[in-house]
Amino acid sequence: MSKNQQMLRKHREQPAAPRPPATSPADELVAGNPMDLAGWREGMVVRKSQGQYTVLAGEHSIQCAISNRLRKQLVYPIADPGSLRAHVVAVEDIRTVDPIAVGDGVQFIDGGDGSGMIVAVLPRRSKVVRRAAGPKPLEQVIVANVDQVVVICAADRPAPSWELVDRYLAAAESTDVPARICITKIDLIAPGALDEEVANYRAIGYPVDLTSASSGAGVAAFAEVLRQRVSVLAGKSGAGKTSILNAVQPGLGLRVGAVSAMTGKGKHTTSYLELFPLAGGGGVIDTPGMREFGLWDVDEDGIAPLFREFRPFVGKCRFGASCRHHEEPGCAITAAVGAGQITPRRYRSYLRMAS
Ligand code: ZN
């Protein structure tokens, strides 16, 4: 087994779901040309800032730059492997797109003094993308090799916004990364108070963890959910993220929260994403907003399939793809709401997102 495989295995011993191999041209080219030369090491990008990448290799962090050769290779995508002419990307676009993402496995040359040079990006298992701004949008990978999205929501103080939860879930669906929900602060509510919502989310396929950092309820089970996986955390400040992470691993929430406070203010949010390794393998990445998920790129008729229980009915409306699933006659979605196959609450979330 190669070092890379060992590293990936450490972070993903029990995959949440099998995933097909990446097949898009972008995935192929991002593999670069991994080489097998003495003096090259492998690690994982845990932070990046202004062209510098912090690479975790074993217990050590190395500050790495990216080689010019690799940068050119990654941002000048080849339009068609059969074509002799490379697709040339405008210089201004190249500046806006960072070819290396947090979570990427990389090969680097170790300078031996805490610095290094990244020379290849290893193939990605999964990726969360958004379109980079600009007249010719390029795919920008925000986080690579993510195993799951965990939507974090408080049981009370503040009262849960299920509509926001649904938005995060839809965003996760648009990335093809499996999602689950962690409800925090359950000590603040009467037992069973959220049973209906919890049962509904579970019924449509989202696991729900009920936790309390105060009482310790559900903490061990949630720690097991995070263990050896790379998780993107979604949820507003106040959702109890810091406390539950501190309960999982002392100090973890405080470190995550310090970075999130920074990203919450700045407009260059994605520049400050950071992967926090977990003691037992795996890691967490906090994201304070949904923009990171690229949900803004979904057009209106692409939203219904992001509500997973809508999918059996999508495409079956009388007016086909032009149906907005609102008041059109013969709409399969509204019929499913009437028949109790879709809850009115989830349907309202859909309408809010689609309007
Ligand atoms: Zn419809």
Image (spheres, rainbow, N blue to C red):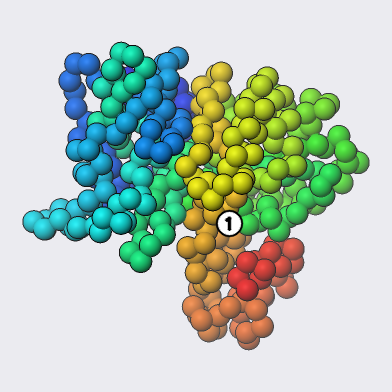
Up the image or down, 87 lies above or below 52; here it is: below
Q: Position of residue 222 (x, y in %)?
A: 67, 30
User: Quick check: 75 above or below 101?
Assistant: below
Find the residue positioned furthest to the bottom: 329
The residue singled out by tag 1 in the image is 170
Q: Is residue 337 above or below residue 151?
A: below
**Residue 350 falls in which quadrant of the image?**
bottom right
Which quadrant of the view contains residue 306?
bottom right
- Tag count: 1
Element marked by disc 1: helix
Residue 16 vertical position relative to residue 319 in the rendered view, above or below? above
Of the pair 231 and 114, the residue shown nearer to us:
114
Badge 1 density bin: few <14, some 14–19, many ≥20, Cα 10 Å = many
Query: Which residue occupies the foreground of this view, 21 or 33?
Result: 33
Q: Nearer the viewer, residue 108 or 322?
A: 108
| Residue at 63% from the left image edge and 57% from the top image edge | 167
Residue positioned 62% across, 27% down in the render? 255
Quadrant occupied by the N terminus: top left
Q: Residue 342 at x, y = what percent? A: 68, 64
Q: Amino acid at mark 1?
A: Ala
- Could you tell me which quadrant the C terminus lies in? bottom right
Residue drawn at x 29%, y 34% as measured from the top left: 66
Confirm if mark 1 falls within 8 A of ligand 1. Answer: no
Can residue 5 be spotted in the picture?
Answer: no
Q: Residue at x 59, y 30 (%)?
A: 226
Q: Is residue 153 left or right of residue 118?
A: right
Q: Tell me if I can see residue 96 in this picture.
A: yes
Residue pushed farthest right?
A: 190
